[in-house]
Image: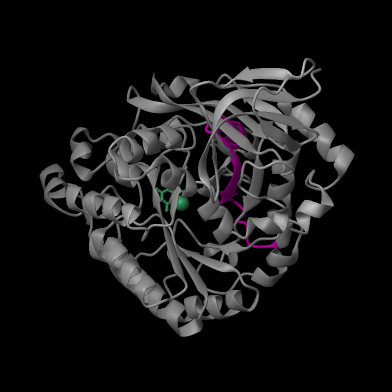
Amino acid sequence: MADGILIKAATVLTFPQGFTGEADIKVKGGLIQKIGRGLRAESYEVLDASGCIVAPGLVEMHAHLREPGMEYKEDVGSGSRAAACGGYSAVFCMPNTDPSIDNSSVAEYVFDRGEDEGLCMVLPHGAVTQGRQGQALAPMGEMGTCRAHVKGFSDDGSPVADSEIMRRAMEYARTFDALIISHSEEPSLSADGQMNEGYYSTFLGLRGIPPESERIGVFRDICLAEKTGAHLHLAHLSTAGSVELVRDAKKRGLPVTCEVATHHFSLDDSSLMGYDTNLKMNPPLRSKADVAALLEALADGTIDVIATDHAPHAPHEKETEFDRAEFGCVGLETALGLVITRLVGEGVLTMEDAISKMTVAPARLMKMERWGYLPAVEEGLPANLVVFDPEQVWTVDPTAFKSRSRNTPYAGWSLRGKVKHTIFRGALVVKDGQLTSGRDAVLSQVKNRGGNGQKQSQLNR
Ligand code: DOR
Ligand code: ZN
């Protein structure tokens, strides 16, 4: 086995500096050992990265990994493999599992499963209410102090419909500096809806979900964040009205952040004309005007984070009548390509800003420094890195996905920007776009170093 990894001639993208030029990077013992020019190391595995960018491993703030209980769609293993191939080093997963992640035992179980797989960090968000039933608060404090150190709480998949419960959840979360991650929606307006309400829903004869459903939910949640002082993070925003409310909230200095999912800026409701159930999500794909507003909000910084809302479903749950199909699409393996093609390629964001919304921004919101996780390419830091070719054009082939599910709307799409290598805790887990047996290397480092495989000095930084 090689003594370490030598990445040759990569263009380094780190934060807060941005692009710092071309360099070689030596990785050894889980850490970025040296960054410089003309580095040599005979006994190291050499990766030619000329023409490629090396950046901190991506951080996913919003994925559904389905374990426990719905492993036929995905589990922590298949989700970790999909994430590593997508360039991710950390994935926060939503608690709408069965049983839901609403107590410390389930949270620790999911966290430990991620450590066992050893391909990326798997960090559970906890439910706001017990069983995600919206009735009684879940033991958030207990989840916050358990081994999984849950910081984000969400009933995602459903809104917390009862405003009093949401208010109490925010008051509680505030006391231990946790985030409430809101799936904002007014259920009475979106009940039984299948797609965005508008011209296309009328044309297709499908019941609509009006944009006001999300906007009213966002307005309520911002009001409650203002009242309680809790950090509110709005998940998967899809409408012009919602981002306008966030823009205003930020101007007023409220503790509000938000994310967009890759499908909401890549697609609009006109694409539903073929009744493809892979285009059915909640919130639904919106109008072209909404997509334009999301792009503007990405560009002006109103939208902090780019997430995937990776939502795997089995064939029998998608290959059915539109109104019976489940909501959601997979996203971990197409996110970087969509971001580079649609946002960087079309001049919406610079590469630095785009990657920052997929690394530094979610890491900061989730306070990942408490794990010793610092999204930067710097000597002495744990080596969690993605190497990608920003120019390579590739065709999305769902049969090649590592996810257990294939429900993607992008089959056959040509995307620019391809993950080549992913390094997690110093081990090469993806090489030339394929999984390696790097997991074993990660596990031996974890064993040798204990805990998260990081130096104590880093944990204290
Ligand atoms: O499209 C979606 N899929 N939206 C959600 O809110 C839930 C998610 C899922 O869990 O499948
Ligand atoms: Zn979700």
Q: Does the rendering let one see residue 459?
A: yes
Single out the residue that lies furthest toward the right: 448
Give the image location of residue 335, x and y in percent.
Answer: 44, 37
| Vertical side of 246 occupied by 9: above or below | above
Q: Which region shows up in magenta?
A: 79-103
**How many marks overall?**
0
Q: Nearer the viewer, residue 384 or 154?
A: 384
Q: Nearer the viewer, residue 417 or 5?
A: 5
| Image quarter hosting the N terminus | top right
Asked if the magenta segment contains residue 93, the reply would be yes
Which residue is at 30% across, 45% downward? 348
Give the image location of residue 209, x and y in percent.
Answer: 25, 57
| Vertical side of 123 occupied by 343: above or below | above
Instruction: Answer with the quarter of the image where residue 129 lies.
Output: bottom right
Give the image location of residue 2, x and y in percent.
Answer: 79, 19
Single out the residue that lies furthest toward the bottom: 227
For residue 263, side relative to residue 427 (left or right) = left
| Vertical side of 253 occupied by 237: above or below | above
Which residue is at 57% across, 58% downward? 364
| Vertical side of 407 occupied by 239: above or below | below
